[in-house]
């Protein structure tokens, strides 16, 4: 039984997408809690809560829809003199410039919606490398996004070992600040490995190489950062759960992005730690 492949639709990784899609005519509900914690000082917690329904249109085409909520709790988390009138101050992604003081800031509300589509071009179960394309537009109160992914996956050891990588490109329109809209573009490499070490259990590691740019067309490189950490996954016939943690091992800011860096790390909507928990229920 230890050699059994993952059930279709299971998410063995925290942030890396794979090509284990819903079979034609089947659906799954997924709840995700994703929390970014800790910045240069004080307190910063950014939570993203996503409720998704996935559906297999064909065996190689999956669509999904999300309802998104968000929370922010920040207080004296920034130490950059380019941002703070006095340091430390309360700032970062989701914190409007009008709250750039020493007072705490809190935000909790329904944020918006997303839709996604995944097309599996080759299947990693029957081909040496599985390849897929992903697209997801998001409309929210904090920001609007358009995300694309190129997904690659290879299975080994009778599908017990899964290697996966995503090349991610995202266009962002941040609109939470009354001072004006912020236009960003991002290119990331997400990568990971997951091994089924016992019936129902897999564990592994995943990482993120992140780059950020001003403007919608990668006009100016502003950030680079690296994250890495472990994941673990457990599955029953009627539900599964995945937990993952990644730590920022270092980052650097350039040009207009220098205000978001200190202590050798990148802040804004990033932190020292990020934790995600996902629960899936086939329908």
Image (tube, rainbow, N blue to C red):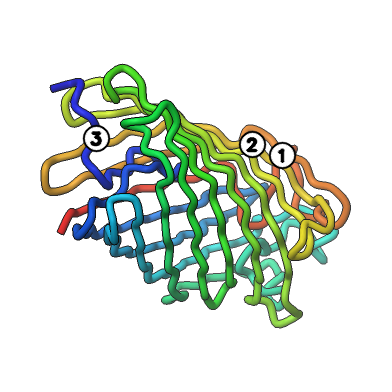
Would residue 130 be found to the left or right of residue 234 on screen? right
> Disc 1 or disc 3, which is closer to the eye?
3
- The residue wearing badge 3 is 6
Q: Residue furthest right?
A: 255
- The residue wearing badge 2 is 226
Please name the residue shown 84% across and 48% down the image.
Answer: 254
Label 2 secondary element:
strand
Image quarter of the N terminus:
top left
> How many residues crowd around disc 1 within 10 Å: few (fewer than 14), some, or many (20 or more)?
many
Corner quadrant of residue 6: top left
Please name the residue shown 68% across and 66% down the image.
Answer: 102
Q: Kindly report the distance in space between the C-alpha atoms of the residues bearing marks 1 and 2.
A: 6 Å
> How many residues crowd around disc 2 within 10 Å: few (fewer than 14), some, or many (20 or more)?
many
Label 1 secondary element:
strand
Whether 248 is drawn above or below 70: the answer is above
Tags 1 and 3 in contact by the CB under 8 Å rule? no
Would residue 101 be found to the left or right of residue 105 on screen? right
Could you say which is closer to the camera, residue 158 or residue 220?
158
- The residue wearing badge 1 is 251
Please name the residue shown 55% across and 39% down the image.
Answer: 190
Does residue 163 show up?
Answer: no
Whether 258 is drawn above or below 194: the answer is below
Please name the residue shown 85% across and 59% down the image.
Answer: 82
> Disc 2 or disc 3, which is closer to the eye?
3
């Amino acid at each position: 039984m230890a050699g059994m492949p993952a059930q279709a639709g299971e998410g063995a990784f925290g942030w890396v997408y794979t090509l284990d899609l819903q079979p034609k005519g089947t659906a799954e509900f997924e709840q995700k809690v994703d929390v970014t914690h800790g910045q240069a000082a004080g307190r910063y917690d950014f939570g993203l809560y996503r409720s998704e329904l996935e559906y297999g249109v064909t065996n190689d085409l999956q669509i999904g829809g999300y309802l998104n909520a968000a929370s922010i709790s920040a207080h004296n988390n920034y130490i950059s003199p380019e941002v703070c009138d006095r340091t430390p101050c309360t700032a970062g992604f989701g914190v409007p410039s009008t709250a750039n003081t020493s007072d705490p800031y809190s935000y909790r509300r329904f944020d918006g919606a997303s839709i996604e589509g995944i097309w599996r071009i080759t299947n990693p179960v029957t081909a040496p490398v599985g390849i897929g394309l992903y697209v997801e537009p998001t409309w929210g109160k904090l920001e609007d996004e358009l995300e694309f992914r190129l997904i690659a996956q290879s299975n080994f050891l009778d599908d017990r070992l899964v290697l996966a990588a995503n090349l991610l490109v995202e266009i962002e329109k941040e609109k939470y600040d009354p001072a004006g809209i912020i236009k960003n573009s991002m290119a990331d490499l997400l990568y990971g490995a997951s091994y089924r070490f016992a019936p129902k259990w897999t564990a592994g590691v995943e990482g993120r190489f992140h780059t950020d740019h001003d403007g919608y067309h990668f006009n100016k490189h502003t950030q680079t950062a690296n994250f890495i950490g472990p994941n673990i996954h457990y599955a029953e016939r009627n539900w599964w759960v995945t937990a993952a943690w990644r730590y920022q091992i270092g980052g650097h800011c350039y040009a207009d992005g220098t205000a978001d860096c200190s202590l050798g790390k990148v802040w804004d909507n990033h932190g020292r730690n990020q934790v995600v928990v996902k629960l899936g229920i086939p329908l």
